[in-house]
Image (cartoon, rainbow, N blue to C red):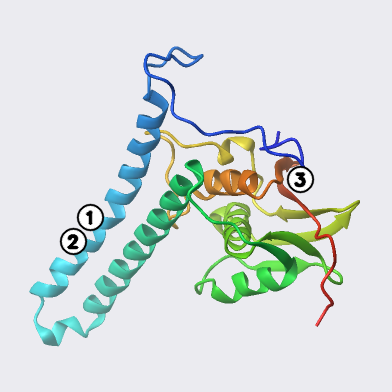
Amino acid sequence: METGPGPTAAPEHEVRQPDRGEVSRNGEAPGAHRGAYLGFVAHEVRNPLSTALWSAELLARMPATERGGARGEKLSAMCLRSLARVRQLVEDHFLCERLDVAGLPFRPEPLDVRELLEAIVARRPPGSPTIELRIAGLVAVEADRILLERTLDALASLAGREGAPVIVDAATEEAVVRVTFSGHPGTWELLEDPRKGSPGEPRGRALAGPLARRATAALRGALRVEEGAFVLALPAPAYTPRAP
């Protein structure tokens, strides 16, 4: 399954709100799917935010001498983890929203896939799943830098669920670049919008799949799940930049 017909054609997938009075094919009332999605996002944000507030309140009530002790350090770490999770959820959610309304300017340019992935690996927090890059030579794509970075990061996060080590392969095949993320077995359902009651994600990456799906369509690419691996296909540039 894929988000679009191919990396050189406009994507068929279009996110839109149902018309007034429209009923979906499964019989849902107008806006029911959208409401279920927003309910999930609200729940995912509320839980870690509540934990962060509770931790901060406890720290504020503790004597200064205890605040620097083992208990204070534990509460501080808990607060920071929760806030980092909220930040990630909010960033992913609003990027999805902007992509839905075509509210992002795109600046396509030739990009080195390995260079982008190395930057993503360098920014990952301690304790993140390992990412092994198996990319021989220069593999370039034509894409918007920021959006491609967010897409690659989201797919690496999906492949690294439950701490699984991630392997990323990239190669050019007939003017199309295929980037494969192997790790924890994936399914197409992980790329679909979650609904209220869908399982959460402890790292704050519950919207990584929906983000990757939307961003791939905006990049005029294709996204598939092949034998449990996520495969991103994007157009190669008209000319290839020289390797450093």
Residue type, numbered disc 3: Pro
Q: Tell whether 143 sits left or right of 55.
A: right
Number of numbered tags placed on the structure image = 3
Q: Which residue is drawn at the image coordinates 56% and 53% (left, top)?
A: 161
Q: Residues within 10 Å of mark 3 (few under 14, many from 20)?
A: many
Camera-side residue: 128 or 171? 171
Give above or below for 216 relative to 70.
above
Q: For mark 3, what is the residue?
A: 7
Camera-side residue: 193 or 21? 21
Camera-side residue: 153 or 131? 153
Residue type, numbered disc 2: Trp
The reply to whether callout 1 and callout 3 are in contact (CB within 8 Å) is no
Residue type, numbered disc 1: Ser
Upstream in sequence: badge 2 or badge 3? 3
Q: Residues within 10 Å of mark 1 (few under 14, many from 20)?
A: some
Q: For mark 1, what is the residue?
A: 50
On the rendered image, what quadrant is the C terminus found in?
bottom right
Q: Which residue is drawn at the image coordinates 58% and 35% (left, top)?
A: 189
Q: CA distance from mark 2 to mark 3?
A: 47 Å
Q: CA distance from mark 1 to mark 2?
A: 6 Å
Q: For mark 2, what is the residue?
A: 54
Question: Would you identify the image quadrant in which residue 49 lies?
Answer: bottom left
Q: Which residue is drawn at the image coordinates 66% and 67% (left, top)?
A: 131
The reply to whether callout 2 and callout 3 are in contact (CB within 8 Å) is no
The reply to whether callout 1 and callout 2 are in contact (CB within 8 Å) is yes
On the rendered image, what quadrant is the N terminus found in?
top right
Question: Would you identify the image quadrant in which residue 181 lies?
Answer: bottom right
Q: Secondary structure at mark 3?
A: loop
Give above or below for 205 relative to 29.
below
Point out residue 93 in the picture as x, y percentages from the top left corner.
42, 49
